Amino acid sequence: MTSPLSNFSLDMFSLTGKVAIVTGGATGLGQAYAVALAKAGADLFVVTHGTSWEETRGLIEKEGCRAEFFQADLANREAHKEIIAKCLEVYGKVDILVNNAGTIRRAPLLEYKAEDWDAVMELNLNSLYFLSQEAAKVMVEQKSGKIINIASMLSFQGGKFVPPYTASKHAVAGVTKAFANELAQYGVQINAIAPGYVETANTAPILEDQERKKEITSRIPTGRWATPADLMGAVVFLASPASDYINGHVLAVDGGWLAR
Ligand code: NAP
């Protein structure tokens, strides 16, 4: 008699034949997610805003995968339907969506401008919600799909000088659970990754402030900041069949920051 345990195989981590959309996928963490998914075998549909995509194309094609790019401002609500329609036109399906694009604007709470609040919430929360909704329509029809939202340590903590960033990232964790609850029955899993402190454009102002950088580093149990490469394993896992029974989870990849 064959044991059901024999069905498990490392092939469950493979993404060969899958199609993945990554927003903000030509720079920083998004580029690392796109390359990780390509290394696992997925073809990519990368959404960019301003960054040139030639370097990212080279990195994806080096893995033997197809790379298509689409320029869009995710703050424009017309863009969400267009992205999914274009991906369907090019590839005929959407297996994975990584909602990575995000922004941060820093100012003291009492001086925080309404337009900055709106801009951060529009990109970090509203665009993630509406793009996920469009992707989910396709995934429910397919009866399979993975949505991976990018949360933050500020999905759990308050932070300072970034009120809408904190509000939006707390909401990302909530939306992840709300989507997961409704869509699990269709074979669609929605989870999130909460990166710790990673060296990218997003954190450049902190990295330039030696004192602040030192203060943060000293609180990280691993004793170092992450690089985008530290996040690559988590995105492949959550995009792959190996995580099919994981729903609505926010996976911290933080060098132990939250465990302190
Ligand atoms: P980043 O280098 O600043 O990346 C931001 C990305 O968002 C870029 O790829 C950018 O695209 C895209 N983007 C910005 N505005 C957009 C718009 N209006 N429409 C479409 N795309 C837009 O920073 P990052 O650190 O890689 O951040 C990626 C994600 O990780 C964000 O959600 C961030 O909150 C999250 N995160 C970062 C850290 C960290 O320590 N770095 C920690 C936790 C969470 P273009 O380059 O094409 O303009």
Image (cartoon, helix red, strand yellow):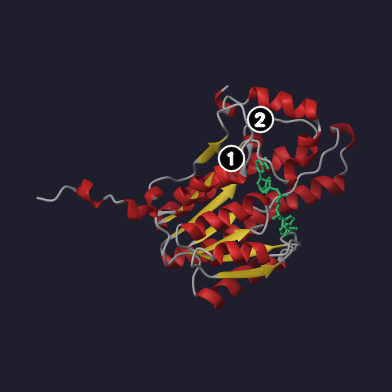
Amino acid found under the numbered disc labelled 2: Gln
Residue 71, compared with residue 9, is above or below; it is: below
Q: Say what secondary structure mark 2 lies in.
A: loop
**Residue topped by disc 2:** 157
Label 1 beta carbon within 8 A of ligand 1: yes
The CA span between labels 2 and 1 is 12 Å
Q: Quadrant of the C terminus?
A: top right
Q: Say what secondary structure mark 1 lies in.
A: strand
| Label number found at residue 184 | none
Viewer-proximal residue among 109 and 58:
58
Where is residue 49 shown, x and y percent of the image? 73, 62
Residue 82, located in which quarter of the rendered image? bottom right
Q: Residue at x 29, y 51 (%)?
A: 9
Q: Residue at x 82, y 39 (%)?
A: 106
**Residue topped by disc 1:** 194
Amino acid found under the numbered disc labelled 1: Ala
**Residue lying furthest left:** 1
Q: Residue at x 42, y 67 (%)?
A: 17
Viewer-proximal residue among 27 and 155:
27
Where is residue 60 shown, x and y percent of the image? 56, 63
Viewer-proximal residue among 233 and 166:
233
- Give neighbour class at mark 2: few <14, some 14-19, many 20+ (Cα, 10 Å): few
Mark 2 or mark 1, which is nearer to you? 1
Where is residue 174 shown, x and y percent of the image? 58, 42
Verify CB contact (< 8 Å) between mark 2 and mark 1: no
Where is residue 130 shown, x and y percent of the image? 64, 59
In this picture, residue 240 sits left or right of residue 20? left
- Give neighbour class at mark 1: few <14, some 14-19, many 20+ (Cα, 10 Å): many
Of label 2 and label 1, which has the lower sequence position?
2
Residue 45, compared with residue 11, is above or below; it is: below
